């Protein structure tokens, strides 16, 4: 019997070292209480977001968010290495039972750098994973590891539709793993118990859907690079469902009137008969642009050629061309883009034969939106497309 005790004590388990003393029961209870508190905090956020969506009030996100995912952790236990170590200590390994699955969660805070990139950092608990070795002679050799830590991720977002998108993440982790072993008197396992802290990395993929302007549902699969029970390189997968709450300001949205009064005249029906002695303001059909460009697309050119006929039929008309943008981007950038769009329309009309001295141009940036954009980060939403436009004021004197 002493023979096995001595040999097992000298087993070369490559456990991470040095290990600190075991975690107290009070610490375990405290971490459990933190998890329950986070879960309770998530509930009012869900109800608050639902209430905001129901009210239909204007919401503008400020880039900050918080979220929580819950799911299953799946560990990679190196049973082959365990068997080798036990064989070296003169134990015949009959089988090794594994418990590779555990409940897991993560809580995090995020900041959206731009519509495509964000940062997320927080705390994760991938759960507890166990094994039990059946040996001859009987040793009751068993082990358990707990995998927790902190992470900082760079998150990339690829929109598919206005509310549905894919995400990919890569980050660094500061892992706090605890390993504990047990056996009968044949094996002295106490010296292998302890905790380890080390830095590693992680990666993941997922899908997300915007339930409302403030709440997003996520489905994710991630891989955390970890050490397994005996210190060799392994990994733990985390499959989860999560909720993300976005912070921002809520205002009652009142659309600003466009700087154009009275009635619209279709360019195809306009003739010289619309010219009257009294001053009158007429409005031509507006035109639209693609995202982040002042270049005219084919549809816009078709409409502008119709406007050319209207303008030639009304030679006394003076035209103010107003350019606009969507809400995405800085105020200064959007102002400059709106001015370029107005100039682009003017240049095309002149090229088609309308006198240059009949035009004035102005840019309004993202002001006076045709439609309210609840999420400016959704670059090609219906509201954003409606706001990327050029409008006309035709003054007939």
Image (spheres, grey):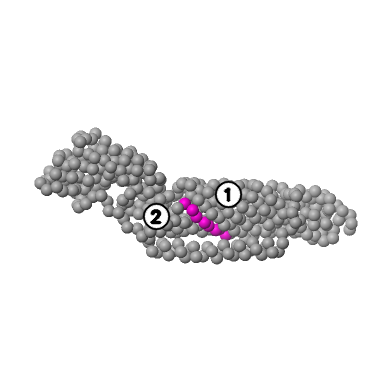
Q: Which residues are magenta?
A: 63-70
User: Which image quarter is the N terminus in?
Assistant: bottom right
Apparent side of residue 36 relative to residue 65 in the rendered image (left or right): right
Q: Is residue 247 above or below residue 290?
A: below
User: Measuring 47% from the left and 51% from the top, which residue is drawn there?
Assistant: 63
Res 306 visible: no
Q: Is residue 39 above or below residue 308?
A: below
In the rendered image, residue 274, in percent from the top left (x then y), is placed at 13, 47
Q: Crowding near pointer 1: few (<14 within 10 Å), some, many (20+)?
A: many
User: Measuring 57% from the left and 46% from the top, which residue is drawn there?
Assistant: 170
In the rendered image, residue 3, in percent from the top left (x then y), is placed at 89, 54
Apparent side of residue 366 relative to residue 78 in the rendered image (left or right): left
User: Which image quarter is the C terminus in?
Assistant: top left
Task: State the residue lying farthest toward the left.
Answer: 277
Using the image as rendered, state which of residue 121 and residue 381 is in the foreground. Answer: 121
Residue position marked by numbered label 1 in the rendering:
152
Pointers 1 and 2 in contact (C-beta within 8 Å):
no
What predominant SS class does the magenta segment belong to?
Answer: strand
Q: Is residue 191 above or below residue 268?
A: below
Using the image as rendered, state which of residue 83 and residue 317 is in the foreground. Answer: 317
Question: For the residue labelled by badge 1, is the local secondary structure a helix, a strand or a loop?
Answer: strand
Apparent side of residue 91 relative to residue 333 in the rendered image (left or right): right
Residue position marked by numbered label 2 in the rendering:
374
Apparent side of residue 301 relative to residue 34 in the rendered image (left or right): left
In the rendered image, residue 4, in percent from the top left (x then y), is placed at 86, 55
């Amino acid at each position: 019997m002493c023979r096995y005790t001595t040999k097992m004590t000298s087993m070369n388990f490559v456990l991470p070292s040095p290990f600190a003393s075991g975690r107290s029961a009070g610490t375990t209870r405290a971490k459990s209480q933190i998890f329950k508190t986070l879960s309770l905090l998530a509930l009012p956020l869900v109800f608050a977001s639902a209430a905001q969506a129901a009210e239909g009030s204007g919401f503008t996100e400020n880039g900050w968010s918080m979220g929580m995912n819950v799911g299953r952790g799946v560990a990679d236990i190196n049973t082959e290495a365990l068997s080798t170590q036990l064989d070296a200590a003169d134990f015949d390994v009959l089988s090794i039972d594994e418990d590779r699955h555990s409940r897991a969660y993560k809580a995090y805070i995020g900041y959206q750098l731009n519509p495509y990139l964000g940062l997320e950092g927080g705390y994760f608990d991938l759960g507890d994973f166990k094994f039990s070795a059946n040996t001859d002679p009987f040793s009751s050799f068993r082990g358990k590891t707990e995998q927790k830590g902190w992470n900082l991720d760079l998150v990339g977002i690829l929109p598919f539709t206005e509310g549905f998108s894919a995400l990919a993440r890569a980050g660094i982790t500061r892992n706090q793993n605890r390993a504990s072993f047990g056996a009968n008197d044949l094996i002295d396992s106490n010296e292998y118990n302890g905790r380890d802290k080390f830095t590693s990395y992680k990666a993941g993929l997922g899908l997300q859907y915007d339930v409302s302007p403030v709440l997003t549902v996520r489905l994710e699969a991630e891989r955390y690079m970890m050490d397994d029970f005996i210190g060799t390189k392994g990994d733990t997968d985390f499959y989860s469902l999560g909720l993300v709450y976005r912070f921002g300001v809520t205002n009652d949205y009142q659309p600003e009137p466009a700087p154009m009064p009275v009635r619209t005249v279709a360019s195809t029906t306009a003739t010289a008969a619309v010219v009257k002695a009294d001053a009158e303001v007429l409005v031509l059909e507006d035109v639209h642009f693609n995202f982040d460009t002042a270049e005219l697309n084919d549809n816009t050119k078709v409409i502008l050629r119709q406007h050319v006929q209207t303008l030639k039929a009304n030679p006394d008309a003076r035209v103010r061309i107003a350019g606009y943008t969507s809400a995405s981007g800085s105020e200064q950038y959007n102002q400059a883009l709106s001015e370029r769009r107005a100039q682009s329309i003017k240049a095309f009309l002149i090229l088609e034969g309308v006198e240059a001295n009949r035009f004035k141009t102005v840019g309004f940036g993202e002001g006076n939106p045709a439609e309210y954009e609840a999420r400016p980060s959704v670059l090609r939403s219906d509201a954003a497309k409606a706001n990327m436009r050029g409008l006309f004021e035709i003054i007939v004197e």
